[in-house]
Image (spheres, grey):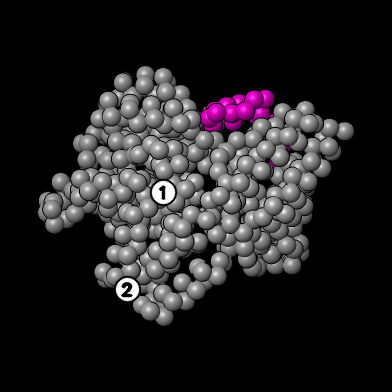
Amino acid sequence: MFMPGPKSRELYERAKKVLPAGISYAIRFFEPHPFYVAKAKGCRVWDVDGNEYTDYWVGHGALILGHNHPLMVKAVKEAVDKIGTHIGLAHEYEVKYAEQVVKMIPSAEMVRFTNSGTEANMYAVRLARAYTKRVKIGKFEGGWHGGYDALHVAVSYPFNEPESAGLTEGATKDTVVLPYNDLDGCRKIMKQHELACVVIEPVLGAGGCIPAEKEFLKGLRELCDETGTLLIFDEVITGFRLAPGGGQEYYGVIPDITVLGKALGGGGLPVGGICSRTEIMELLDHLKYPNKTERAFHGGTYTANPLVSYVGCTILKEFEKGYVYPHINRLGDKIRNGLEEIFQKYNLQIHVTGTGSMIGIHFTKKKPINAREANEGKDIELSKKYHAHLLNNHIVVIKPTLPHLFLCYAHTDDEVEEFLRVTEEFAKSIKK
Ligand code: PMP
């Protein structure tokens, strides 16, 4: 088992009294308790006991340039000096930010900003319902879109229960669940239900970094067109990570609505966004639609605050230059190929999925193509053992029952080679 240091223990004892489970998000909990971070830089974090770790979680995948990148830090200071953190009135930086998003995201003609990916998905679904005047929505098994009620179903295996207490039947009864990477299965279900939209991650993130097959995504696009359903790409992880234009650029499949988050904030500032073509986005325009029942609502106190707008826009321009992607994608291939070689060499039933800088490690009999296969017959105990082994070797990966990794621009061949060395040590030890 992993044993954090005494200062982390002390903080955990205090935290337990004031934060349920001693953390602010269940996914950040490790057995027996988390270590508490004191500082972070590049691909490293240091805990309060002075232990150094190589981080493959990089802020829930948000930090494509790594922790506290100098450009991001400089932009934060500039923003505070120039205008401040929050105004609550229109300002020039939100216009520049929106122009930059529209320039980079193929499906975007207009954008609205939110404060999180959850919120962006909520508004996207509402917009789709307002546009199509349909009620039901589709989502995929294992698709994680945040905590919004209507999308808070069929996330964890066996996908047959709500993900939380407190969800009313009414909130989830119009959500139809679809099988990932199974076009025939989707067709059958989509012909039975009139759906306002289908929400899909181009690569399942929390579901195990499992990429959609290109033919599947293309087929789904056609199926949506045939049935008058809006295709929503939840690009909260894949946006700006797979390519400057996200998964839609990477796959060459253009959705109707795109949901953004994480890296949209440039490296750690809370934000989300919805974008689409003008015809759809205009439904948010209270001038064009003065009657509130004819338009869809979106807003919020901190939406497009100057801090996030300035920093987000600055870093998006950095992504646009494109130099990040060959580096993180090459390292992604190197780690995937290296892991596969190790698991084959030691004849282990462990499989590697992912694409670009997203990597999933599955303790399953065969390589999964969807979240169902990633869970059926999974060796959870071995997965937890591997996770603890990584932590004991100062490598941070989330989560014990489904290890998945994100790379950032600060990772190098050295870190990847160390990751592979530590994994081989694990493989050897369980083969004995
Ligand atoms: N969609 C996807 C694909 C995500 O990975 C996440 C966050 N992990 C969300 C939505 C929710 O975003 P947030 O945590 O910012 O609410």
Relative depth, front residue between 114 and 341 = 341
**CA separation in Å, label 2 and label 1:** 29 Å
Residue 109 horizontal side relative to residue 13, left or right: left
Magenta stretch encompasses residue 371: yes
Task: Give percent across and percent down for residue 90.
Answer: 26, 69
The residue that appears at 22% across and 48% down in the rendered structure is 278
Residue 166, placed above or below residue 89: above
Outermost residue, bottom direction? 81
Q: Amino acid at mark 2?
A: Ile
Disc 2: residue Cβ within 8 A of ligand 1's nearest atom: no
Relative depth, front residue between 159 and 110 = 110
Residue 159, placed above or below residue 203: above
Task: Give percent across and percent down for residue 102.
Answer: 32, 54
Residue 270 visible, this orientation:
no
Query: Mark 1 sits on what residue?
Result: 245
Outermost residue, right direction? 432
Q: Secondary structure at mark 1?
A: loop
The residue that appears at 44% across and 27% down in the rendered structure is 215
Q: Nearer the viewer, mark 2 or mark 1?
A: 1
Looking at the rendering, the stretch of residues picked out in magenta corresponds to 364-384
Crowding near pointer 1: few (<14 within 10 Å), some, many (20+)?
many
Disc 2 and disc 1 in contact, CB within 8 angstroms: no
Task: Give percent across and percent down for residue 267.
Answer: 50, 61
Q: Secondary structure at mark 2?
A: loop
Query: Mark 2 sits on what residue?
Result: 87
